[in-house]
Image (cartoon, rainbow, N blue to C red):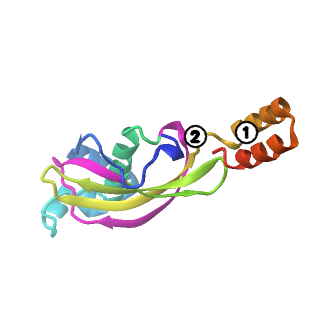
Amino acid sequence: MKYDDFIVGETFKTKSLHITEEEIIQFATTFDPQYMHIDKEKAEQSRFKGIIASGMHTLSISFKLWVEEGKYGEEVVAGTQMNNVKFIKPVYPGNTLYVIAEITNKKSIKKENGLVTVSLSTYNENEEIVFKGEVTALSNHRYGLLHCFVIHLYRIFYYRSHIAHHTLYLRFWHCS
């Protein structure tokens, strides 16, 4: 979706993803090698009573599910920030996660693009929230500056009048 297609307040429910112990250990071994993520015996003696997913793993799964929903597409230029990241409940092997994504803010920053903020709330199979966070991305407008410029030039040459030129010049800046 392009910047113009996102509607503040719109929500999306993603598909679900089943989490395995093997995936938890593999992710944590590479990115967060703390005992509660990689050492089954030690983790069973901890407050968690077993292996749990790293918070970064849960965040990554949440973002993966949102991206796979297909709303970002190629129109997203780059992620710009994450805010209000909260790891609410542990994610255990065998949990199945899904995300409710809500468009919470839009801000046009240039003729070509704008910022879109999405709140991600991740739930397990028992509908318990396990993660919450906001991601903001730079997204292209439906019509970028080059497209508007071409339309503007066409109109100038087509109409040729000073009044039409002035009117169309103003429209050019509001094209997107």
Cα separation, mark 2 vs mark 1, equals 12 Å
For the residue pair 1 and 128, the one nearer the viewer reads as: 1
Q: Amino acid at mark 1?
A: Leu
Quarter that holds the C terminus: top right
* Residue 146: assigned label: 1
Residue beneath disc 2: 142
Report the magenta residues as a range. 73-102
Q: Main secondary structure of the magenta part?
A: strand
Residue 38 seen anywhere in this rendered image of the structure: no
Q: Position of residue 120 (x, y in %)?
A: 34, 55
Q: Nearer the viewer, residue 167 or 66?
A: 167
Checking the image for residue 42, the label placed there is none
**Residue at position x 85%, y 31% from top?**
157
> For residue 47, what is the image quadrant?
bottom left
Task: Judge from the rendering whether residue 6 lies leftward or rightward of residue 36; answer left or right.
Answer: right
- The image position of residue 42, as x and y in percent, is 18, 63
- The picture quadrant where one finds residue 50 is bottom left
Viewer-closest of 41 and 3: 3
Q: Secondary structure at mark 2?
A: loop
